[in-house]
């Protein structure tokens, strides 16, 4: 969920903003009031040191230019007070002017450093968003007869991408989907996620069966993860939990292969069914590639049904009291709605459960089989909009 920040770099743009004009009036009013009161106070009462409050307040919402301007006004006001109370010959007034000048300068320098770091952060976030578009490439809202919606929740405020991954590929006979979770975090996890997604996008079109596709993923992970990971900095095991699906266009029987991933949920009307695998495979990267070890589980996926795929960041999200998020239970209590609306309900309910803070990244993918009359023919070009920390199908929540 993006946070709109107040513009700080230009005095003129700040003054044009109604809120900016109100904020600028505060330090200016303080300078005027303190100056007038101090001039009319007895000579032995000194309110001039309070002028430092003006630049100190300005730095909280303005940039270095406006902060330095308010600091200069405060110093000028102190000079005016000194002149009205006997001139600049007083040691006390001279000390106050010097101290106020030094403090205003320091506050301006702090503002400059903050602005520089803010610009660096903006560049980093821009690079991260570009990397996300290249790596994740979330699916469009329609893939053949399927309606698709996705949600990515980053645990860190400034995080854009992590080890959670998902994708949908359109094939000649239907659609294939994957959702996965890479062990670990940071750049290593992103590198491993890129390996899996690249192999999936290629194998989804090349492999005739789902077990063959999973074997191709296993081979790619075994061959490439070590190269994509800085082993000298991370000596632990490297593996990826993954769930792959094969959904034909004209057959209600769909297949899945679960490699150590949380089971998907099938939503049929108000009923929620957990699709446990009868022959689960180990996570990718744990064992040597072996096609015979990958057995498919078949389930019925009819028009109007929806599948909810998710990573463990959802079901392992804890409340302040330590309770896990009861995803299946909450889904049964939600009214029937579109995939996008369902994800928005989950998003709001999940953040309420955790107290607005997630300890791990979380990804969700909803795939709904639309009625046959809504089947869109022809090629479907993925359309992805840059996301902030929490997005549903590229739209801010």
Image (cartoon, grey):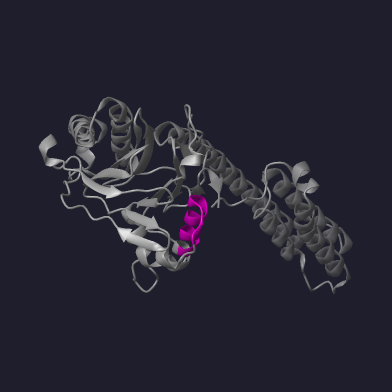
- Identify the residue at the far top of this view: 206
The image shows residue 220 at horizontal and vertical percentages of 22, 30
In this picture, residue 202 sits left or right of residue 4: left
Residue 372 visible to an observer of this rendering: yes
Q: Residue at x 31, y 27 (%)?
A: 205
The image shows residue 202 at horizontal and vertical percentages of 31, 26
- Of the pair 90 and 38, the residue shown nearer to us: 38
- Of the pair 124 and 130, the residue shown nearer to us: 130
Measured along the vertical axis of the image, is residue 282 above or below residue 359?
above
- Number of numbered discs on residues: 0
Q: Residue at x 13, y 35 (%)?
A: 291
The magenta segment is 336-349
Q: Residue at x 63, y 51 (%)?
A: 107
Say if the magenta span includes residue 69. no
Measured along the vertical axis of the image, is residue 156 above or below residue 381?
below
Instruction: Say which quarter of the image contains residue 295.
Output: top left
In this picture, residue 7 sits left or right of residue 41: left
The image shows residue 93 at horizontal and vertical percentages of 76, 61
Main secondary structure along the magenta-highlighted residues: helix
The image shows residue 26 at horizontal and vertical percentages of 77, 60
Q: Residue at x 37, y 33 (%)?
A: 169
In this picture, residue 291 sits left or right of residue 356: left
- Of the pair 158 and 239, the residue shown nearer to us: 239
Residue 290 visible to an observer of this rendering: no
Measured along the vertical axis of the image, is residue 354 above or below residue 242?
below
- Of the pair 100 and 216, the residue shown nearer to us: 216
């Amino acid at each position: 969920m993006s946070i709109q920040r107040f513009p700080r770099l230009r005095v003129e743009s700040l003054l044009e903003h109604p809120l900016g004009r109100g904020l600028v009036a505060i330090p200016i009013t303080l300078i005027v009031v303190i100056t007038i009161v101090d001039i009319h106070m007895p000579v032995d009462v000194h309110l001039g040191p309070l002028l430092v409050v003006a630049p100190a307040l300005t730095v909280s919402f303005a940039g270095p230019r406006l902060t330095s301007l308010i600091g200069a006004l405060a110093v000028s006001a102190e000079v005016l007070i000194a002149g009205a109370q006997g001139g600049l010959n007083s040691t006390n007034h001279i000390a106050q002017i010097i101290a106020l000048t030094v403090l205003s300068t320091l506050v301006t320098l702090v503002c400059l450093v903050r602005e520089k770091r803010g610009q660096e952060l903006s560049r980093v976030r821009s690079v991260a968003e570009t990397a996300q578009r290249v790596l994740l490439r979330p699916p469009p809202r329609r893939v053949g007869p399927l309606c698709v919606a996705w949600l990515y929740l980053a645990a860190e405020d400034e995080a854009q991408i992590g080890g959670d991954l998902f994708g949908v590929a359109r094939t000649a006979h239907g659609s294939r989907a994957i959702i996965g979770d890479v062990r670990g975090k940071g750049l290593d996890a992103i590198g491993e996620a890129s390996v899996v997604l690249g192999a999936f996008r290629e194998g989804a079109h090349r492999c005739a069966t789902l077990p063959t596709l999973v074997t191709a993923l296993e081979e790619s992970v075994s061959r490439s993860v070590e190269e994509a990971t800085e082993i000298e900095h991370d000596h632990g095991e490297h593996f990826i939990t993954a769930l792959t699906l094969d959904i034909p266009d004209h057959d209600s029987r769909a297949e899945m292969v679960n490699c150590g991933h949380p089971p998907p949920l099938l939503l049929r009307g108000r009923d929620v069914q957990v699709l446990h695998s009868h022959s689960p495979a180990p996570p990718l990267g744990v064992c040597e590639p072996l096609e015979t070890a990958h057995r498919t589980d078949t389930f019925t996926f009819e028009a109007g049904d929806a599948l909810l795929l998710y990573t463990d960041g959802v079901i392992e999200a804890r409340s302040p009291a330590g309770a896990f998020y009861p995803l299946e239970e909450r889904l049964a209590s939600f009214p029937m709605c579109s995939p996008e609306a369902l994800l928005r309900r989950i998003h709001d309910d999940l953040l309420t459960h955790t107290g607005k803070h997630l300890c791990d990244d979380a990804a969700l993918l909803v795939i709904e089989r639309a009625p046959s009359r809504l089947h869109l023919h022809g090629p479907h070009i993925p359309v992805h909009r840059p996301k902030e920390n929490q997005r549903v199908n590229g739209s801010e929540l």
